[in-house]
Structures are given as structure tokens and as C-alpha cells.
Image: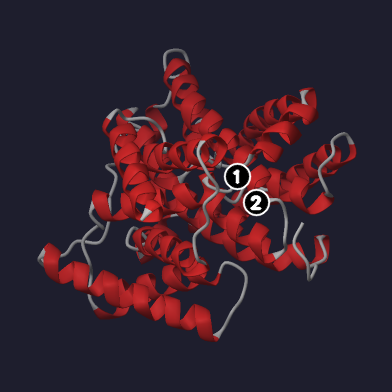
Amino acid sequence: MKKPLLLLAGFTAGYLFDLMSVPAGWLLGAMLVGAFYRLFINEVSYPNYLFNLSLAVIGISISLSIQVSMFQEAANYLLPLAVTLVTLLTASWFLGKLLAKYSNLDEKTALFCCLPAGASVMMALSREYNANMSMVAAFQTVRIMMLVSTIPIVAGFMTSFISTTDAQGTNLSTGNESSMSMWTAILFYLLLTVLTLLLARKWAIPIAPFLYSIVLGFLFVTLVQPLPSMPNLMVGGGMALLGVIIGSRFDRDSLLEIKQIGWMSLAVLLAFFLLTFVITFVFYILTPLDFITSLIAIVPAGAPQMASVASSLNLDASIVAAMQVIRLLVIILIIPMLVPFLVKKESDHL
């Protein structure tokens, strides 16, 4: 009985955080609930199929915002994007090496802490390669929260003295247009989720539910039937489920490990923040976009969050959305293929 109640508490906390406009509120609120329960009340664990379910729901919600026109619009920026991604991944790999050298973390965990693929992707890879999931969760959450919380403030401040006239005036398209009723759409969401889980079970690859759900959702809305954006409560449910599962793995040993890392963890996070502006400058000099639009389009802090920031600042939100979605897709496709060359999979858990 405690497991369903904990999930309900996580959903409630995520909802309240989202209601208060806390960045990544659904994930953060639920994660705090799971971590609090694990640290101060009792140990708890959830079956793997719930973890896969959360990834499938999140992946499908992302796939609904992908449009062919996005790729066509951003085609001129693919080479600059490739250069910035190579720079970002190389620097992240180097930071992972430094973190492993000057801390008590193993190389796999340190690498997964620093790779900019998002908490859900890195959690799945951490489980696949038996890395320290709680430590990866802590680092990835702090990194994402740091960027999501600071980049909009920095961008808003910069608009007061940096011209963005070349990048203004494009409205953000939030998803595929559809006249379908929401109840009918929910049935299709459930169908796509079931198909995703079946495929992930039959053909198991790293982060299979996340990858399959994005591909299936995109193919469905492109070739079969456009679907409306997934309801906030449904997306939030997936994020809250993931948050509780991640948080419940955050034990006292992980807190002690973070404390023992000390200054090195702060140094890596600060280096990542500065790295964001380095790759922004690289993208800026290779494209006709202004610096602020380049920053919002490139920063690895979440496609929907950054597209919303661009829209609120009256920047070219369609370019930002396109570049963020392409960046996300490239990252989640490339990193699982690179990881086997960077780390070795072990048969026993850490």
C-alpha cells in the first residue's frame, strides 16, 4: 500500500511545483518526495516496467511536437549544430574524466553525470550499464535545474543591451493541429504506449522505451493521424512516476558521496555553465542568428522550456523549437551508440 501512496504523494508534489511554475516542477517535486521517503522513512523500490512506462509516456509527449517542417526550417543550421554538439560532447567527456580522477566516482558514473542527454536518458543508461543511478540522478537534476533556472534570467537581461531584431516575429507552433477529441486522442496515446512497451520487451536496446516511443509517435502523427498535445496531467504523471522512482534511489550513501566529492562537483557544474556560453558563441559565429537566440536554441536545458522562453522574449521560437528537438534527437541517438566505446558493461551491480 505504501508504494501507491508514495506515487500519489509524488504526483501531488509535482502538480503543486508545476502550478507554482517551478522549472521541471513535475519531475523535481516527485523526486523530492521519493528522496525524502527513502532518506527519512523507509526503503522502497519499484519494478522496471514502471520505469519503462514513464519513459514511454515522456517520449510520446515529445514526439507529438516533432513536425517535418521543423527539420526543413532548421536544415541550414545542421552543420553549425553538428560542430556545437561535437564540442559539447567532447567537453562533457573531458569533464567526466576530471570528475572521475578527482572524486571517488567510477568512470561510468562520472561520465553519465556529465553527458548532457537529460535525466531520463541518463537514468536509463545508468541502469543499463550498472552505474550509480542515485549519483547520476543528483548531478543531472542539479545541472538541468541550474540551466533552466538561470538561462532565462540571463537571456532576459541580455535582451536589454543586445539587438535581437533579426530574430523576432516568428510564432511558436506548439504541436500538430488536430480536431480529434481529447478522449479519442488518449486512446491513441495508450495504444502507442502499449506498442512501445511491447517493442522494448522484444528488442531490448539501451533506453528502448524512450527511443521507440519517439519514433512511433512521430511516424503516427506524420503518416496516420495528427494528435493534439498530450494533456499536462498525463505528461506530468509520466514525469512524476519517473521522479519518484529516481528519488527513491537517492540514499544516504549517495549523499555522503556527494559530500565527499565536495568542491569538484561544484567545479564541474560551474564549468558546464560556462561551457554553455562557449558552444553558444561557436553556434553564433557560424550562423546569422543573434547571440540570445543562439543561446536559447543550443543550451541543453529542455526543448519545451527553451521554446517557451524564446516565445516570451519575442525571439524566433520556431527556430529554437526546431534546433532543440533536433539536438535532443541527435543526443539520444548518438550517446547510446557512443557509450559502449567509452565504458564497459558489467554483469554485477555497483
Label 2 SS: helix
Q: Can you name the residue that lies furthest to the bottom here? A: 202
Label 2 near label 1: C-beta < 8 Å?
yes
Residue 231 in which image quadrant:
bottom left
Q: Where is residue 193 in the image (x, y as percent from the top left)?
A: 35, 72
Question: In the image, is residue 295 above or below residue 156?
Answer: below
Question: In the image, is residue 42 above or below residue 120?
Answer: above
Q: Which mark is residue 133?
A: 2
Q: Position of residue 47 (x, y in %)?
A: 50, 66
Judged left or right of residue 6, residue 145 is right
Residue in the image at 37% along x and 62% along y: 57
Q: How crowded is mark 1: few (under 14 residues within 10 Å), some or many (20 or more)?
A: many
The image quadrant where one finds the N terminus is bottom left
Residue in the image at 64% along x and 61% along y: 127
Question: In the image, is residue 175 above or below residue 178?
Answer: above
Can see residue 286?
no
Q: Disc 1 residue type?
A: Ala
Residue 104 in which image quadrant:
top right
Q: How far apart are marks 1 and 2 (CA)?
A: 6 Å
Q: Position of residue 72 (x, y in %)?
A: 42, 62
Judged left or right of residue 12, residue 102 is right
Label 1 SS: helix
Q: Residue 266 carries which label?
A: none
The image quadrant where one finds the C terminus is bottom right
Question: In the image, is residue 326 above or below residue 152?
Answer: below
Residue in the image at 77% along x and 45% along y: 110
Q: Position of residue 217 (x, y in %)?
A: 36, 71
Residue for badge 1: 137
Residue in the image at 16% along x and 65% along y: 178
